[in-house]
Amino acid sequence: MNDNQVSDFMNHEPVYCNRTTRIAEIKYLLNKYNLEELIVVDEERHPIGVVNFADVDNEEIESMDIPSDVSAIECMRQIPAVVMNNSTLEETLNVMRTNQTTSIAVVDANGHLEGVIEKDIITKIIM
């Protein structure tokens, strides 16, 4: 059994946006950092949702009077799960499998975003 903690392998500088980030910037960040999803955080940096291209490039948004005025809070999905920074890699992988996600936000004891880890990284380490 592997007891490596997720904090040892996570990206300590995750890319994220806040609830008021407009869709143009969301698209820019997704493209620039080649991300599948972008984490949305509140004012205290608690993860509150995720947003991807499908969330910002859809007919409902395009049909609005000014689609560029849409912000992350209006198109995000609830974040499926987070893990604590002291979670093991195996625990983290199990949470990812349960929630059918390829990446997961890592939080500290106060629930603040501390990092993110990809499923591929974990499987390379423990498999």
Image: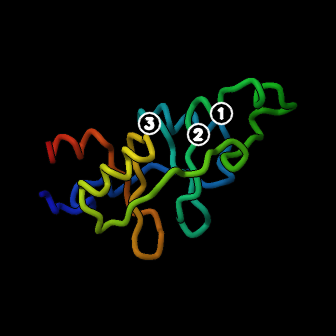
Q: Residues within 10 Å of mark 2 (few under 14, many from 20)?
A: many
Looking at the image, which residue is at 58% across and 57% down? 48
| Image vertical order of residue 71 relative to residue 106, above or below | above
Q: Which mark sits nearer the N-terminus, 2 or 3?
A: 2
- The residue wearing badge 2 is 26
- The residue wearing badge 3 is 35
> Where's residue 34, x and y in %?
41, 33
| Image vertical order of residue 111 relative to residue 92, above or below | below
Residue type at mark 1: give it: Val
Q: Are marks 2 and 1 in contact (CB under 8 Å)?
A: yes
Looking at the image, which residue is at 45% across and 49% down? 15
Residue type at mark 2: give it: Ile
| Direction bottom: furthest residue | 110
**SS at mark 3?**
loop
Q: Residues within 10 Å of mark 3 (few under 14, many from 20)?
A: few
**SS at mark 2?**
helix
Image quarter of residue 60: top right
> Where's residue 59, x and y in %?
75, 23
Q: Is residue 57 left or right of residue 98?
A: right
Q: Residues within 10 Å of mark 1 (few under 14, many from 20)?
A: many
- The residue wearing badge 1 is 56
Label 3 and label 1: CA atoms lie apart by 14 Å
> Where's residue 115, x and y in %?
37, 58
